[in-house]
Amino acid sequence: MLTNIQIKILKKISPGAPSCCGGGVYKGKSKLAVLMGNEFFARIAGKTVVDFGCGEGADAIEMAQKGAKRVIGIDIREDVLRTARQKALDAGVQDTCLFATSTKEPADIVVSVDAFEHFADPAEILRIMDTLLQPSGQVLASFGPTWYHPLGGHLFSVFPWAHLLFSEKALIAWRSTFKTDGATRFSEVAGGLNQMTIAKFEECVARSPFKIAAIEFVPIRKVQPFHNRLTREFTTAIVRCDLVKRT
């Protein structure tokens, strides 16, 4: 009964897919600079970089254009890799960029953008990243919103924290009115949602081949005065971190 009531409320609030979490915030800006920080391009200059989960290659191409010695875009989807290769050719960086489903070429840096809240098995991903790096290599990651962020439910955030107030069952049923992929859990939707929190990420790294060399919790601008160690799960917009191999 409660689930049915929640579904009706969700349909009333949002008859179709909400428009949250769009890419409009990056219009006229470098997404990499926004998410990774302004010093990012200086850090990858002259380095061999793996773009882990490269998609259609926009970030990999930008890294190549802004100083990386070599960029290897990795993705499990061959269709997006084909698109990435064509985009690299069009941009004239085809000799710098390689796009493949895997690589044995050791990298100086693995870059992960907007992904750790989506990986089905983040611990396994960290183990894979470890194999891609030279002994002195590092992971530069940026991700968010995390699960307790007002829009941490991504598509399911029909209003702030809706994904915490409504049941998974109700939210999935509401989503099925405009998405027909058969998903029955948050983890099964396109892109996946693993309900990643800051604490879960830190615990995952603690059990991995890596340790945190640096971590930054970029606050949501409007609530910055309230952002601190106790409130960070709810007030952090982006998590940025540097991971290095354990010695």
Image (cartoon, rainbow, N blue to C red):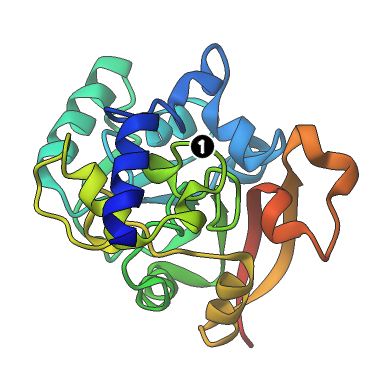
Left or right, residue 203 beside residue 117: right
Q: Which residue is mark 1?
A: 159
Number of numbered discs: 1
Instruction: Answer whether residue 112 is visible to the viewer in this image.
Output: yes
Residue projecting furthest to the right = 225
Percent x, y for residue 100? 20, 50
Query: What's the residue type where badge 1 is placed?
Result: Phe
Q: Nearer the viewer, residue 186 or 163?
A: 163
* Quarter of the figure with residue 57: top left
**How far across and how far down the image is residue 196, in percent?**
49, 64
Considering depth in this image, is 223 or 219 the residue closer to the camera?
223
Q: Is residue 166 above or below residue 84?
A: below
Point out the residue furthest to the front here.
Answer: 1
For the point 32% across and 50% down, the residue is 5
Q: Is residue 168 above or below residue 189?
A: below
Q: Nearer the viewer, residue 11 or 77?
A: 11
User: In the image, residue 64 lies at what x, y percent?
Assistant: 44, 32
Q: Is residue 186 left or right of residue 156?
A: left
Q: Quadrant of the N terminus?
A: bottom left
Q: Residue at x 75, y 58 (%)?
A: 232
Q: Secondary structure at mark 1?
A: loop
Task: Note whether residue 53 is visible.
Answer: no
